[in-house]
């Protein structure tokens, strides 16, 4: 692996890290518990421990929707952890407004974060009233479909290059005893399928009209109707999966029991842990093969205000470590995501990561859904799509009508 010039990137970090004379333990909460995620978070822990401090892992099993209420309750209840994961967007906005989060503006300025960040929108998502309150640690995109090459070979059909080709191959996959599309039984996964379909089949402008402009007329119109028709196809192809977590669904693809999965690039970490090789054992299709676009999603870490001076100093060290170029390479190669920094070279990047980097370099990106709608609106859409996947009698028209109502009342 060759890392680009790190002199400037590390100049601010070196002095800060040197100040950690005594080991200070920091409790860090996150929801990274799958095999690939655990391997990635271990890179953060190792890098922080190397500064003479101690990463005290406090992973919360389940998805972010399970973990976030626990995290928020602890912070608002006066029992804050030292650092906590959130997705970009508005998830931590009220905590920042309440003055419960540490201001990282001076650290970011000293280390030149704005000069090297590869996705400026993610740093902007950490910013409120001109002040920076979190450190972005990766660029994640939902806009991927993962396919088992062997599953299609055993079904006697070519590996699809688009959503339409997957739909066409579905009957052959069923005949071969395969699940055409693996979808876990959690609300955020089912919403994710819909949102990826909207981007891939409807295009960026349609997604922005619906989620950014909150245009209920468009949400109720013919373009979105086509997306709900595709969602009916997804529901039919997913029948028989009977798994809940996203990584269980990914494992169906890894073990060739399912043909495909629509999931963010964090799924790639699971393929790597299983020893799968991109382009050989599995195929990745950004934008489902129909629209080569990635969403500028990502994970960020916030640092609740603490009364302990030593822990407060260690918080800055941890923030610096997470943004450091070397740590970024090590973490994101395991996580399956793209580095938040643009000043690193990734000679070790696999076929799928190279596709993502090329799309990012071309500027074919879209804002994350989380940055356009509130958590309350997200909860409403999640509930809708959960019901839709659970009830085959719910028609596309009925679901779209409810979706349009949700968009009409969104702020």
Image (cartoon, grey):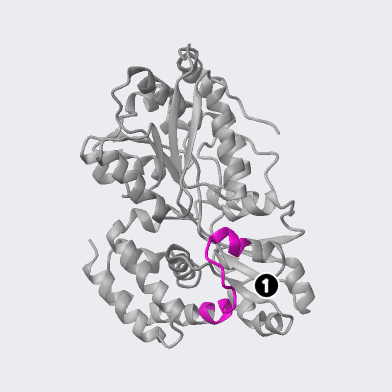
- Left or right for 158, reference 395: right
Is residue 410 visible in the rendered image? The answer is: yes
Above-or-below relation of 364 to 4? below
Residue 340 to residue 314: above or below: below
In the picture provided, is 107 more to the left or to the right than 289?
left
Q: Position of residue 57 (x, y in %)?
A: 49, 36
- Please state the extent of the stretch shown in magenta in the rendering: 234-250
* Mark 1, other Cα within 10 Å: few <14 / some 14–19 / many ≥20: many
Nearest the eye: 295 or 83: 83
Please count the marks in the image. Answer: 1
In the picture, which quadrant includes the C terminus?
A: bottom left
- Asked which quadrant contains residue 156, the reply is bottom right
* Placement of the N terminus among the 4 image quadrants: top right
290 vs 299: above or below:
below
Q: Residue at x 37, y 82 (%)?
A: 222
Based on the displayed image, in which of its 4 quarters is residue 73 positioned? top left
Of 340 and 46, the residue lying toward us: 46
Residue at screen point 30% across, 35% down: 79
Q: Which residue is mark 1?
A: 160
Q: Is residue 103 magenta?
A: no
Q: Nearer the viewer, residue 299 or 286?
A: 299
User: Is any part of residue 227 visible from this angle?
Assistant: no
* Residue 359 point in image, percent of width and height: 56, 53
User: For numbered disc 1, what is the local secondary structure?
Assistant: loop
Q: Position of residue 164 (x, y in %)?
A: 59, 78
Q: Is residue 348 left or right of residue 90?
A: right
In the displayed structure, 75 sits above or below 280; it is above
Q: Position of residue 204 (x, y in %)?
A: 43, 64
Task: Indicate yes or no whether the magenta region holds residue 240.
Answer: yes
Query: Camera-side residue: 205 or 214?
Result: 214
């Amino acid at each position: 692996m060759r890392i680009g010039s790190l002199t400037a990137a590390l100049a601010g970090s070196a002095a800060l890290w040197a100040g950690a004379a005594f080991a200070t333990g920091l409790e860090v909460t996150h929801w990274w518990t799958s095999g690939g995620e655990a391997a990635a978070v271990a890179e953060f822990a190792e890098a922080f421990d190397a500064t003479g401090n101690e990463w005290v892992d406090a992973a919360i099993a389940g998805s972010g929707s399970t973990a976030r209420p626990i995290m928020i309750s602890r912070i608002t209840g006066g029992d804050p952890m030292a650092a906590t994961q959130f997705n970009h967007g508005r998830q931590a906005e009220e905590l920042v407004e309440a003055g419960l989060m540490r201001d990282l503006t001076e650290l970011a300025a000293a280390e030149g974060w704005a000069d090297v960040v590869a996705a400026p929108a993610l740093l902007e998502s950490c910013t409120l009233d001109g002040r920076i309150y979190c450190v972005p640690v990766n660029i994640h995109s939902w806009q991927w479909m993962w396919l088992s090459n062997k599953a299609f070979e055993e079904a006697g059909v070519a590996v699809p290059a688009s959503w339409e080709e997957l739909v066409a191959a579905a009957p052959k996959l069923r005949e071969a005893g395969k699940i055409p599309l693996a979808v876990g039984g959690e609300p955020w996964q089912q919403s994710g399928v819909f949102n990826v379909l909207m981007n891939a089949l409807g295009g960026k402008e349609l997604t922005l009209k619906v989620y950014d402009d909150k245009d209920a007329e468009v949400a109720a119109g013919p373009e979105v109707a086509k997306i709900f028709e595709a969602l009916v196809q997804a529901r039919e192809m997913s029948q028989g999966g009977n798994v809940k977590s996203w990584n269980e669904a990914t494992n169906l693809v890894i073990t060739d029991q399912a043909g495909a999965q629509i999931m963010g690039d964090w799924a790639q970490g699971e393929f790597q842990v299983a020893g799968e090789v991109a382009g050989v054992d599995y195929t990745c299709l950004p934008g489902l093969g129909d629209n080569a676009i990635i969403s500028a999603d990502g994970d960020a870490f916030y640092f609740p205000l603490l009364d302990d001076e030593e822990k407060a100093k260690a918080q800055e060290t941890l923030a610096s470590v997470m943004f450091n170029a070397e740590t970024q390479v090590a973490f994101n190669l395991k996580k399956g995501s793209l580095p938040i920094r643009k000043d690193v070279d990734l000679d070790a990047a696999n076929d799928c990561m190279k596709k993502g980097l090329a799309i990012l370099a071309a500027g074919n990106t879209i804002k994350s859904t989380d940055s356009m709608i509130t958590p309350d609106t997200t909860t409403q859409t999640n509930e809708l799509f959960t019901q839709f996947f659970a009830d085959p009698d719910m028609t596309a028209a009925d679901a779209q009508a409810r979706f349009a109502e949700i968009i009409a009342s969104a702020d």
